[in-house]
Image (cartoon, rainbow, N blue to C red):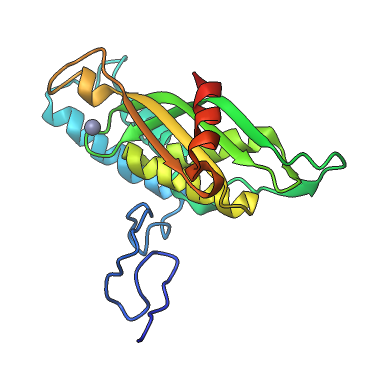
Amino acid sequence: MLIPNYAANGKSTNGQNSHQPNYETPLKSNAFDLSDEEKVTQIEAHFQEIMNVLGLDLTDDSLKGTPRRVAKMFVKEIFQGLNSKDKPTISLFENKFQYRQMLIERNITVKSFCEHHFLPIIGRCHIAYMSTGKVIGLSKLNRIVDYFSRRPQVQERLTMQISNELKIVLQTEDVAVYLEAEHMCVKMRGVEHDHSDTVTSEYSGKFLNENTRAEFLQAIR
Ligand SMILES: [Zn+2]
């Protein structure tokens, strides 16, 4: 039987779609040909046109700076995590005490953007892993969540991207990610329900074990 090799994007190298799910953010191959400054200039012009079409008077003092402000916010803040040059660099180091139990980082702020409506997703992420005896700077866990949040997202993919990155960085399969978030596209439009939120989770390695998972879930309650 021929087993195809899989490229990093989850597609088989012979060009056919694999059964392996693809959790990559869909990006054009030339996504980073333009510099950030060039992107800001182009988005500014397009956003100005959106405001124009809406009938807003862009000579008004309060409005005239908005297109550029929005363009800079998109490129340099809210969607900064699209570019892998901004991916946090992580190094692990050995620890003397050889801690090999569960480590949980709770209540990591998630500020993302729904890719279907371009409205905020605000929530919290809880991460756990079984240490292999190596140590990661704890704030690096927050930085990984932040990096993948700063993209147009769907919560399911965000959860998987965080989980996959943690497995690579922490050099272990024993990873749990639990994400609870409120979607402004549910609250402000469509059904306009204020009190629902969305929970997604991904467990692998030792967290597939019921007791281990229960210990984690107990801790984040
Ligand atoms: Zn949405």
Towards the viewer: 17 or 34: 17
- Residue 12: quarter of image: bottom left
- Residue 22: quarter of image: bottom left
Towards the viewer: 161 or 132: 132
Q: Position of residue 84 (x, y in %)?
A: 51, 53
Q: In which quarter of the image is the N terminus?
A: bottom left
Q: Please state the quadrant of the image where ligand 1 appears.
A: top left
Q: Residue furthest bottom?
A: 1
Residue at 50% across, 30% down = 214
Q: Is residue 195 above or below residue 164?
A: above
Q: Position of residue 122 (x, y in %)?
A: 39, 24
Residue at 19% across, 15% down = 193
Q: Position of residue 107 (x, y in %)?
A: 53, 23
Q: Is residue 54 visible?
A: yes
Q: Is residue 24 above or below residue 142?
A: below
Q: Position of residue 71 (x, y in %)?
A: 36, 36
Q: Which residue lies furthest to the front in this view?
A: 211
Towards the viewer: 221 or 153: 221
Q: In this view, does 181 lie to the left or right of 85?
A: left
Q: Can residue 65 be seen in this view?
A: no
Q: Is residue 53 above or below residue 8?
A: above
Q: Is residue 177 above or below residue 51?
A: below
Residue at 60% across, 29% down = 105
Q: Is residue 67 left or right of residue 77?
A: left
Towards the viewer: 44 or 112: 112
Image label count: 0
